[in-house]
Amino acid sequence: MSIVLELQDASIYQRDQIILNDVNLSLNKGDFAYLIGQTGSGKSSLLKTLYGELPLKDGNGVVVDFDLKAITRKEIPFLRRKLGIVFQDFKLLSDRNVEENLKFVLKATGWKKKDDIQLRISDVLERVGLKTKAQKMPYELSGGEQQRVVIARALLNRPELILADEPTGNLDPDTSDKIILLLREIAEKYKVTILMATHDYTILEKFPAQILRCQNGRVLNEQRMLL
């Protein structure tokens, strides 16, 4: 198995305050796991540490072959190019259409050839079922469609790992189910590792998977059988 994410005896900090202690976890290529816990339990701090926004001060951590303990500020953009990050509040650029939103990210991450850019945008939109929506503005899309654009954006640079922070938080239950099924399909079909933070425990019952629970300053690993 190819390990994509691993923390060993790690401590997660916000500034000088320790949030999580003695964290040990690993995810392999194509794994799908939930990150759960009450508000303030450390979920967001853990995700921020994984994508380099918070430094790893204690313990060891490797994410998509980057050593979190040794990573420099200059290297963080290169780490993030190997990650896909999906936020709850979409963070789409409201003044440009879907295609231009995706083009902006590709150009910002070094893509230069027009044909390559167009082909990649077409590919990711097809994967998320939005090939006919490329010219739509974000406000013309439903919440579920906007989140699909965000997932398409996360797929642009062929990430090995997607970190999804409450991706269904602003969606109705039916739309949430469709987004989870899409993420599960991406993990299974394209062997992308996905760690999804959520507070919606009904999702865990409907779509069982490995659970990482932030509780009392620790991360507990709970295995669930996949249906």
Image (cartoon, rainbow, N blue to C red):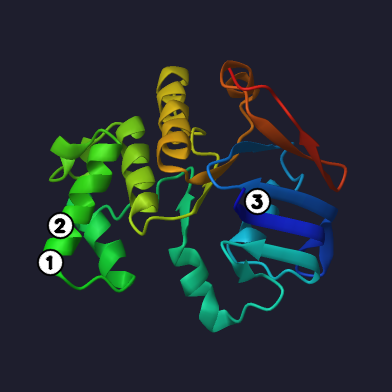
Residue 114 numbered mark, or none: 1
Secondary structure of the residue carrying tag 2 is: helix
Q: Is residue 91 above or below residue 51?
A: above
**Where residue 51 sits in the image (x, y, percent)?**
58, 62
Q: What residue type is labelled 2?
A: Gln
Task: Look at discs 3 and 2 and give the one toward the viewer.
Answer: 2
Residue beneath disc 3: 44
Quadrant showing the C terminus: top right
- For the question of whether residue 97 can be seen, the reply is no
Query: Would you call the spot at circle 3 few (<14 residues within 10 Å), some (14-19), or many (20 or more)?
Result: some
Q: Residue furthest front?
A: 1
Asked which quadrant contains residue 117, the reply is bottom left
**Where residue 217 sits in the image (x, y, percent)?**
86, 48
Dot 3 or dot 2: first in sequence order is 3
Left or right for 34, reference 119 = right
Estimate the spatial distance between the alpha carbons at disc 3 and disc 2, rounded to whole Å: 33 Å
